[in-house]
Amino acid sequence: MADITILYEDGEALVIDKPSGMAVDRPRKGGICLEDHLDRLKLGFQRAPVAVHRLDTDTSGCLLLARNPKALARFNKSFEDRLVGKTYLAILAGRPPGTEGTIELALSKISSAEKGWRMIPAKKGKPAVSHWELVGELGPHSLIRFRPETGRTHQLRVHALKGLGAPLLGDPVYGAGNAPGAKRTMLHAESLTVTRPGKTAIEARAPLPADFRALGAKDE
């Protein structure tokens, strides 16, 4: 079983560093998933923790788990009210138009027999907002930090392609897929912050993954 690093722990929350390649929900086709590890993540509690949000299977980094139903309800409301701060590091297969900005592109889900389902920009879609900044250049690629205001499915992947003009390196759906040095979509949930009335805020930061380092990314 994969080793899971705990980044934050208290009586109502865990934040783990989810490995790339691990699905949060059990895949229909099988494969490793978070559910296989939840009993080990009880850490003395009677209940197994529950994932509050989702990360794509390829995406590594900060994932918040609730340790009881009341905490789950509060955290869900925090996400709904946009009170959760998140940053993501991404390697763009190209160069962005500038050094920082905000992408506002509403997203809608479509499906076809040939390509399966995917997200596209659509005026009548759900609002999606991502702030971004250029962290550094990695040869022909770029290291980008995203600060999403919303949490739509595949938001950063589509915003990279349509808002910055290039897909995330290794993205098999919105890009070219296999790329030298990238065996997955190069997206990492870098940090997570949840403010709580009357309690210390949840703050967690996931270290830079080895595959990001291999492409030249460095700790700031």
Image (spheres, rainbow, N blue to C red):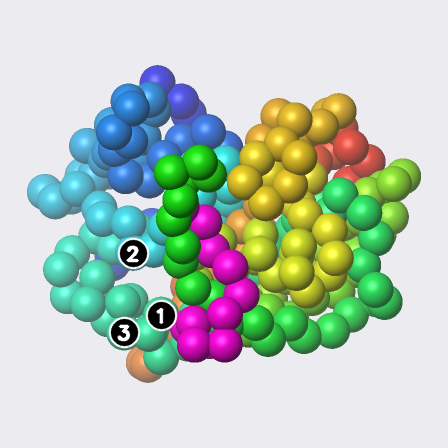
Q: Amino acid at mark 3?
A: Lys
- What x and y, as percent, mark residue 77? 27, 74
Say left or right for 164 vs 104.
right
Q: Secondary structure at mark 1?
A: helix
Q: Which residue is mark 1?
A: 79
Tags 1 and 3 touching, CB below 8 Å: yes
Label for residue 52?
Answer: 2
149 falls in the magenta region: no
119 falls in the magenta region: yes
Say left or right for 126 vs 186.
left
Q: Secondary structure at mark 2?
A: loop
Label for residue 137?
Answer: none
Real-space Cα separation, disc 2 to disc 3, in angstroms: 10 Å
Q: Quadrant of residue 161?
A: bottom right
Counting residues from the start of the chain, the first of labels 2 and 1 encountered is 2
Q: Secondary structure at mark 3?
A: helix
Q: Amino acid at mark 2?
A: Val
Which span is picked out in magenta? 117-128
Other residues around mark 2 within 10 Å, as few (<14) / some (14–19) / many (≥20): some
Q: Which residue is mark 3?
A: 77
